[in-house]
Image: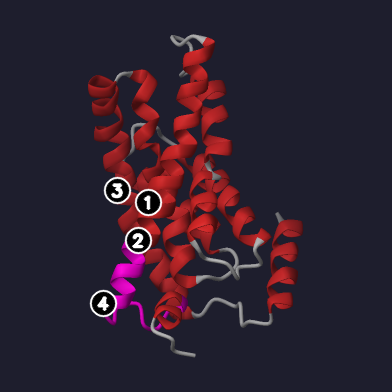
Amino acid sequence: MRKFYNLVMRDSRVSGKGQKLTTVELTFTAILSALVGAVFLFWSNVVWDLAKLTLGLLFTPIIYGMWFIGATLPAYIVRKPGVAILGEFLAAVFELAYGTQFASTVLLYGFMQGLMTELVLLATRYRRWGWATMMAAGAAPALWAAPADTLLYGITAPLTREQSLVFWSLYFVSGALIAGVLVKALVDYVARNSSILDSFAVGRELKGVA
């Protein structure tokens, strides 16, 4: 973890931008994570089981991307190193505190999913925030979630090999669309049409403020 942190900070210095999180940014990320944690709880305790009943197991992962927004949402707004991991992990902490049916395993998922998104953003040195980057950042947590669900929960046991491939691919599609496209579209809309995000990087960029 320390080596990863050093790598993140080294690359952020190369970018030439002030990358240390401010108190406002940390507080904002924590509050946003508390709200996202409530969404996670609803997804865990209600939506997941409802999706299995209505869509069938094969197509249930189409709703999975909502569990990845804890990383992409604050990271896209703040645009500094470590925010993706922090946001996703804190959201998982809040989900656990609220009473998720998946118990403490959500903490492992939260950290690893946040790490996957963080690595995508690190690869761009936190400079690129277009549609392609956000789709990749939104889909990346599936690299952990899909195999973890299979190995830890045996979720694909009732499926054939071909069905399993469809099942796993939907993790990536859902992440790209929900945690990538949807998050970017909604944040861009709010940033352009209100002053709520003016003090954050996304608001300054979209309104052309230095």
Q: Position of residue 191 (x, y in %)?
A: 33, 75
Label 4 with label 1: CB-CB less than 8 Å: no
Residue 154 visible to the viewer = no
Q: Reading the chain from its start, which is encountered first: label 4 or label 2?
A: 2
Amino acid type, mark 3: Val
Q: Residue under circle 4?
A: 193
Q: Residue at x 49, y 9 (%)?
A: 160
| Mark 3 lies on residue | 39
Indicate which disc residue 60 carries: none
Label 1 crowd bin: few (<14), some (14–19), many (20+), radius 10 Å: many
Left or right: residue 202 compared with residue 17: left
Q: Residue at x 50, y 18 (%)?
A: 164
For the residue marked with disc 1, what is the amino acid?
A: Phe
In the current view of this chain or complex, which residue is farthest to the bottom?
210
Quarter of image, res 85: bottom right
Q: Secondary structure at mark 1?
A: helix
Identified by mark 4, the residue type is: Asn
